[in-house]
Image (cartoon, coloured by chain):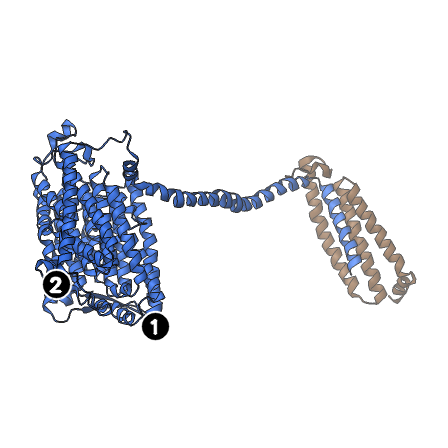
Chain colours: A brown, B blue
Amino acid sequence: MENITQAIQGIPLNHYILLSAIIFAIGVMGVLIRRNAIVIFMSVELMLNAVNLLLTAFSAYRGDAAGQVFVFFIMALAAAEVAVGLAIIVMVYRNTSSVDINVLNKLKW
Amino acid sequence: MINLVYLVPVFPLIGFLINGLGRNVWSKTLVSWIGSLAILLSFGLSLGIFFELQAATQKSFLVPIFDWISVGSLHIPFSFLVDPLSAIMLLIVTGIGFLIHVYSSGYMHEDAGFAKFFAYLNLFIFFMLLLVLGSNYVVMFIGWEGVGLCSYLLIGFWFTNGNYASAAKKAFVINRIGDLGFLLGVFLIYSTFGSVEFAQVFPQAALMAPGNATLALITILLFIGATGKSAQLPLFTWLPDAMAGPTPVSALIHAATMVTAGIYMITRSNILFTLAPFTTEIIAVVGLATAIVAALIALTQNDIKKVLAYSTVSQLGYMFLGLGVGAYTGAFFHVITHAFFKALLFLGAGSVIHAMHHEQDMRSMGGLRQKLPITFLTMLTGTIAISGLPPFSGFFSKDEILAHAYEHSPILWAIGVAGAMLTAFYMFRMLFLTFFGTFRGTKDQEKHLHESPASMTIPLVVLAILSIVGGFIGVPEVLGGHHWLAQFLSPVLAYTNAVAGETIPLDHATEYLLMCISVGAALISIAVAYVIYISRKAVPAADTEERSFLSNLSYHKFYIDELYSAIITRPLDIISQFFFKVVDKLGIDGLVNGIGTSAKEASKTLRLIQTGNVGFYIFMMVLGIVALLIYGFYHI
């Protein structure tokens, strides 16, 4: 375990932050630009995991395991969320024969 | 007997409750018996009280009923005061009240609201008795307001007629102006003397200096109250309109009892007024002005009840003239005799109206003498009495007032005699137009002319006898009398007599001369009326004909109603229209509705943002987060 921690600390913290920021930005752009509900869903996961990455990096640098435990909880929660989200998308597809979010514009004034 | 005085108002109250609650149950006969019997019992008790009081050496009995208000230093018991003044008022109210109840059982017999009418009459008697019996100003005020209420209910008795209903409202509103004055006067009495009990106020007041400013203010406020209730200038316009009520009501409330409440109140508070010479001057002038103005209006009226109404206002003016010149006994004497002959005249007019099937215009009458002999004779008695011919009752009382006015100032006396001339003229004009000449109504009316039933003629006869002999309770010494009334009332006027001292009576020669002049003046008026309405057979012009300027002025009541409506009602209407249309409708409603409308309009625009496009929502969410981030960077 010592080695892993050292290996992590071998790379400067700024790089982790930058990487996380880039992944998060890609996720945001994906959500904003794509119209396919599944792709948007994946982009959301990307944003989530960018945050997870940052949490583990900080946790390793501070030598505090609490951050990594927290990440496990987030992953468990994300799994549940994915199950619900995919189920919704399946239902949308069954009703509209499409996963294009622009079709879902019935709820308005 | 005096300890039972509380029963006197209780009987009418019971009568009111029985008739009021069972108005749809009892038969008309039962209703009239209950109503009349209640008053008769009260009258019997009042007679007992009167004779007991006359025999007793003590002349003032305080009969406590219960403690009513007791808060801090304010202590108002509900108690009755029996003294010569209230004893005589009891007799007038219950005695004439009883006769009018009997009369009503005949007059109102065809009316659907028969039981309601008797219930109201009994309630009126109850409140009137409270008014005259109360031993303090607050109990008096309850009665004062109560009679006003009953007056309103009875003027508007035939309320389905819009004019009658508004006459009732008018009477109520104008009375309210006066009542406010009375109420303020009572407040001022309490703050000045620390009590509203007569027995505590008057001794304290007697110690004050004449011309005291507080006393002047109190008396002016009380006098304003009296002008409202007793129909004096400038508040008299309600009384002629009050003739909308059934005729017995006019006789009982608007001639004999309620309208004399103001005179009763001032006589009761005589010491306050004696010590306020400024107020008494005002009272004398207002009374005289009212007497003359009302008499002038009465000259040209064609409605038989309107003539009597203005005559009542005019006679009340004489009573106030008497109060103003310090002739409390004379004024109260006139209250008594006026109650007799004016009730008689009104009931007689009611009998005529009954025979004519509710025709009140004298232009359609005439020659009723043969058809209605009892009514004619009794009304002739009343007319002679009010004109002031000896030895009928009106002569003694009016003469006493005029004699005191002469002592005060010969000018007041001269104007008073002129008013008496007018009185004699318009009363005989009414009599001649109604009972003499030829019948001017329709054939149908002529066929149905009939003398009224006994229930109506008996009260007329009784009142006619009273009108003849009523004056003998106050025969002045110059005519060899003892003036029993003055002696009987002297305990009530004790403070005033002590302050004013013994007035030097006029020498007999002057007094004879004054009497001769006033009687002569009345006789001349009667002769003039005879020439115009019998010898020349003049009939008042129809409404469509042109009138001379003066006659027009009198016929239209000096345009006083129009004047009031122009200077008071109209501006009030305009102001309330302004408040209604501008302040309320535009201002307040505008503000409230404006807030509602703006919220509605704003949301109508804003809801268009909700497009239903998920991508747009997410974009907006991101924009929001970015904005928050930027905000966070600059503010942490």
In the picture of the structure, the residue carrying the numbered disc 2 is B50
In the picture of the structure, the residue carrying the numbered disc 1 is B73
Callout 2: SS:
helix
Image quadrant where residue A31 sits: top right
* Residue B611 seen in the figure: yes
Considering depth in this image, is B600 or A98 the residue closer to the camera?
Answer: B600
Q: Is residue A2 above or below residue B531?
A: below
Q: Quick one: label 2, few (<14), some, or many (20+) residues within 10 Å?
A: many
Q: Position of residue B406 (x, y in %)?
A: 21, 56
Q: Chain of mark 2?
A: B
Image quadrant where residue A95 sits: top right
Which corner quadrant holds the C terminus of chain B?
bottom right
The amino acid type of the residue labelled 2 equals: Phe
Q: Position of residue B423 (x, y in %)?
A: 19, 45
Q: Chain of mark 1?
A: B
Which corner quadrant holds the N terminus of chain B?
bottom left
- Earlier residue among tags 1 and 2: 2
Q: Position of residue B528 (x, y in %)?
A: 16, 39
Tell me the mark number nearer the camera, choosing from 1 and 2: 2
Q: Position of residue B180 (x, y in %)?
A: 34, 56
The amino acid type of the residue labelled 1 equals: Ser
Left or right? Give the position of B178 relative to B447. right
* Residue B96 seen in the figure: no
Callout 1: SS:
loop
Circles 1 and 2 on the same subunit: yes
Q: Residue at x 80, y 57 (%)?
A: B634
- Alpha carbons under labels 1 and 2: distance apart: 35 Å
